[in-house]
């Protein structure tokens, strides 16, 4: 195989692998974030809404809804923070992955050069 063809093939393969890994990692991060948010923040909140049905007076209901609103604001802040952390992790992993592939390509090129000289 011509060295230029080999280099082109390796580069195309590398780009394809990076895209596949990036997509798979994005899918993993998104599904894990959805699961974490659902299990940690949403399920208990939805289950606790049954208490609203048991309240007897409008005053009790109003107090419950105020507390729920306040809690929702705090929960939203936590969810936004979690999303930002996951986005930062995703970005850092993509950068590290890109560097790994660049190092791999540089090594392959170096080996090709050494092989063609020797």
Image: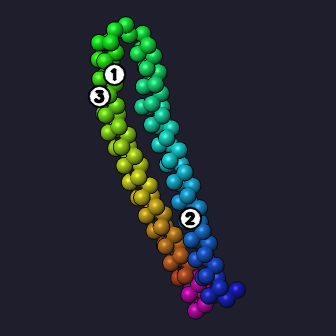
Judged by depth in the image, the label closer to the viewer, 2 or 1, is 1
**Location of residue 80 in the rendering, given as x and y in whole percent from the top left corner:** 36, 43
Q: Nearer the viewer, residue 14 or 67?
A: 67
| Residue 42 position within the rendered picture, expressed as x and y whole percent measured from the top left | 45, 30
Indicate which disc residue 19 carries: 2
The residue shown at (32%, 39%) is 77
Q: Quadrant of residue 112?
A: bottom right
Judge the density around disc 2: few (<14), some (14-19), many (≥20) Cα neighbours within 10 Å. Answer: few
**Horizontal and vertical percent for residue 45?**
42, 25
Q: Using the numbered discs, state the Cα–Cα distance from disc 2 to disc 3 in whole angstroms.
A: 42 Å
Q: Main secondary structure of the magenta part?
A: helix
Quarter of the picture containing the N terminus is bottom right
Cα distance, mark 1 to mark 3? 9 Å
Marked residue nearer the N-terminal end (1 or 3): 1
**By what rule are the colours in the image chosen?**
rainbow
Tell me what residue is drawn at x 48 percent, y 34 percent: 38
In the rendered image, the vertical position of residue 8 relative to residue 101, given as above or below: below
How far is disc 2 from disc 1 in space, using C-alphas?
46 Å
Which residue lies under the disc numbered 1?
A: 65
């Amino acid at each position: 195989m011509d060295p230029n063809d080999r280099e082109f093939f390796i580069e195309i393969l590398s780009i394809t692998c990076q895209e596949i890994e990036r997509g798979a990692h994005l899918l993993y991060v998104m599904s894990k974030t959805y699961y974490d948010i659902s299990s940690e923040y949403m399920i208990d909140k939805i289950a606790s809404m049954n208490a609203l049905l048991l309240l007897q007076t409008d005053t009790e209901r109003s107090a419950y809804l105020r507390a729920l609103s306040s809690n929702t604001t705090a929960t939203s802040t936590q969810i936004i923070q979690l999303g930002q952390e996951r986005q930062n992790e995703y970005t850092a992993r993509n950068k590290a992955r890109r560097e790994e592939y660049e190092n791999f390509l540089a090594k392959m090129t170096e080996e090709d050069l050494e092989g063609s000289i020797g």
